[in-house]
Amino acid sequence: ISECLVGSEMCIRDRRYGTVRRFGYYLLPLLLGVADAVRQVLNYYKVRNPGTLLDHWLIMTAGTQPYQPNTLHSYNFPTIWLIMQAFMLLVVNGYTSGDLEEHGSVMIVKSRSRAGWWLSKCVWCMFSTLLAYVIYYIPMFLIFAWRGIPMKMHLTKRLVTTSVEGFLNWKTADVCAVVLFIPVAVMMFLCLLQMLLEVVWSPAVAIILLLVIQGISAYKQSVFLWGNWGIPVRMLKTPIGYIGNLRCSIAGIIVCIVIGTILFKRRDLLFKE
């Protein structure tokens, strides 16, 4: 019981210091959400055929196709997508390594569990990622409702001539998974990976390394480039299917948690005796 109480105390502490006192970082996805929703309305809203919430949600988060050499198709770099990746990573960047240097040893001694401290940070990281996505989507709901877009979760012919027209043949539940669950799962994996890298190296190295890989993913589609896992338009043509992308993300989350737990059981690797 005492261990559960200490674990609960660590989680509450992470919410206070990692979320409430760092709430300024959440303004980044909020501002991007406003800009992205306004851009979506200006570019795709039509009075005669306003579409539905799911139509615009899918178009807004679609991303772009990978670079295809020797073709007549022009390549559009997914700038908004990459900015969003950077903002989401910045939300959690630096907190875990900073807390480890300042108060980590005290909390680990108090809890008598190095693994417990790490698991608490993993819970905080996934919670923060989910919260950042909720904050990003709030302006979308408000602006779409203000413009009179029906708040319905089904696709219409509004998608015709867009890059995601192929989703018209998909079931609504599958499309919801593509726009809602999979991108969040992928970002949880990336944020956990960043957190793991920052306690081994540094926050700057972690975020730069991940953004470089995300930048490569923007150009090239490959199962081994995890940035592609969360781009909806690329799920139309993926060798492992969108369910495979989700499975890879969940597997990545588990691997990060397990490796971090193993590392934190080796005190001499992360602490000076």
Image (cartoon, rainbow, N blue to C red):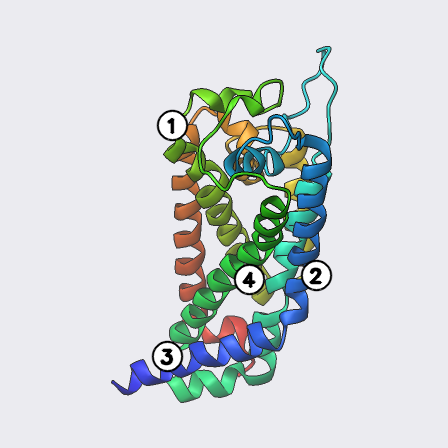
Q: Mark 4 points at which residue?
A: 195
* First along the sequence among labels 3 and 2: 3
* First along the sequence among labels 4 and 2: 4
Q: Name the residue under label 3.
A: 7
* First along the sequence among labels 3 and 1: 3
Q: Position of residue 8 (x, y in %)?
A: 37, 80
Tag 4 near tag 3, CB within 8 Å: no
Amino acid at dot 3: Gly
Q: How far apart are marks 1 and 2 (CA)?
A: 41 Å
Q: Dot 3: what SS?
A: helix
Would residue 109 be visible to someone looking at this image? yes
Residue at left offset 54%, top offset 51%: 190
Q: Dot 2: what SS?
A: helix
Tag 3 near tag 1, CB within 8 Å: no
Looking at the rendered image, the disc whose residue lies closer to the viewer, 4 or 3, is 3
Q: How far apart are marks 3 and 2 (CA)?
A: 29 Å
**Badge 2, how many Cα within 10 Å: few under 14, some, many 20+?**
few
Q: Mark 1 points at which residue?
A: 171
Q: Where is residue 70 in the image (x, y as percent from the top left)?
A: 72, 11
Residue at left offset 54%, top offset 77%: 271
> Quarter of the image containing the N terminus?
bottom left
**Badge 1, how many Cα within 10 Å: few under 14, some, many 20+?**
few
Q: Mark 2 points at which residue?
A: 204
